[in-house]
Amino acid sequence: MTRISKDSVAEVLTGIIDSDSGKNILEAGFVKKIHVDGATISCILDVGTANAREKEPMRAECENALKAIAGVESVQVILTAERQSPSAPAAPAANQPPPAPTPNALPGVKTIIAVASGKGGVGKSTTSVNLALALKNTGLRVGLLDLDIFGPSLPKLVGIEGQRPSLNDNDKIIPIEVLGMKVMSIGLLTKNNEAIVWRGPRVMSATNQLLKDVAWGELDVLVLDLPPGTGDVQLSLIQTVPVNGAVIVSTPQDLALIDARKGMQMFEKTNVRVLGIVENMSSFSCPKCGEVSHIFGHGGAADTAKDLGVDFLGEVPLHMDIRAFSDAGTPIVDRKPDSPQAAAYIAIAAKIKEKITLPV
C-alpha cells in the first residue's frame, strides 16, 4: 500500500491557485492544518475573509485533487474564516498601545469541557447530562450544549422536546433553563424527528452558531456533548473556542476502545487536554439475584487509559434506572441523587472539577 505523507499532500496543494492573489494556497497562507491517518486525509483551509462562501470552489478543487492521490480512500477539506484578513492592519499605529489580548471566544464562560466518544451507542449523551448535573449540584453555574448535529438527544434526555428558544434584544438565542442549567441543542431549532442532511460547511456553520450566537451569560462551566467520531464538528469546535479539557466515554469492549483511542489522539493532536476516560455500561447487576455480570467485558477502559498515559475517571454500571429516567427526561442524578448509579456520575464529576480547578 502506498504511504501517503504530509509532504505529498502539500505538493498537491501547491497546484491549487487562489484566484484573488494569484498565489498557490500554501503561499497565500490558507493551509492551516494537514492531517494524514493511513488512507484518510483531512485539511483545514483558513481563508481569512468574512465571506468564506466565495472560496467554496477552491475548497472543492482541493478535495478533488487530494482524492486523486494514489491510495487515498477518504478526504475531508474544511473551510474556515478565523484568521485576520490580509487587508487588516498588521500593527498598531505609532504611539498607540498594543492591541488587547484576544477575548474569550464565549464571553462569560469560564471553562469548556467536551464529552466525546469514538463511536456511537456508548452512552455519551447520558453521561454528558448526568456529569453536567453533578457539577451543577456542587454549586457551579452550568450550561449544557448538544453539538450532535445529526443525532441530537439532549431535548429528550432533559424533558424539553417541542420547546423553542426565543431571541433577546441582540438577536442572540436564549437557552432553555431546565434542571438548574442552561441548555441548548440543534434539536430545539428543527422539527421533531426531522433528518438533518448537511455537508461539512453547513455543519460547521451550525456548530459556530450554537457556540457563539447563544446568550449563555455567566457560566462556570459549559459542557459540550459532541457527536461520535472525529469529524467536522470536532474540528470546527476546536478552532472556534478554547476547550479546557475533554472526557472520553467508551464501553469496555475492544471495538469501542479502538475508536476511543482515535478520539483521544484527535484531541492530543489539536492540543486539547484529555482529562480521562469513563467506562460506561461497565457491569450489570441482576435485579432478581444480585449477580454481577460484565456483559461487554470489564476493565478495558482502565487498561486503555494506562496505555495512553491518561487518567481513568471511573465506571458507570448498566442499569435499568439510568435508561428509564433518561427516557423520561429526568436524569438519574436529578431523580435519584442518592442511588449508587448517580454516585458513579457524581464521583467522576468530582474528579473532573478537581482537574480543571473549577471554583468551589
Image (tube, rainbow, N blue to C red):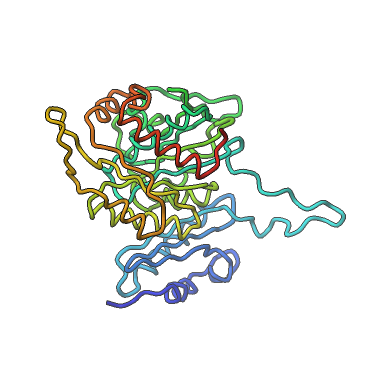
Measured from the top left, where is residue 349 in percent x and y? 43, 37
> How many numbered discs, if any?
0
Measured from the top left, where is residue 298 in percent x and y? 23, 48
Would residue 313 appear left or right of 220 to someone viewing this image?
A: left
- Residue 234 visible in the displayed image: yes
Indicate whether 220 appears above or below 119. Answer: above
- Residue 186 visible in the displayed image: no
Indicate whether 288 appears above or below 234. Answer: above
- The residue lying furthest to the front in this view is 290
What residue is rendered at 50% in x and 57% in y? 271
Q: Where is residue 320, by image quadrant? A: top left
Q: Nearer the viewer, residue 310 or 12?
A: 310
- The residue lying furthest to the right in this view is 95
Measured from the top left, where is residue 28 in percent x and y? 58, 67
Q: Nearer the viewer, residue 266 or 296?
A: 296
Would residue 126 appear left or right of 137 to someone viewing this image?
A: left
Measured from the top left, where is residue 155 in percent x and y? 36, 28
Indicate whether 120 appears above or below 262. Answer: above
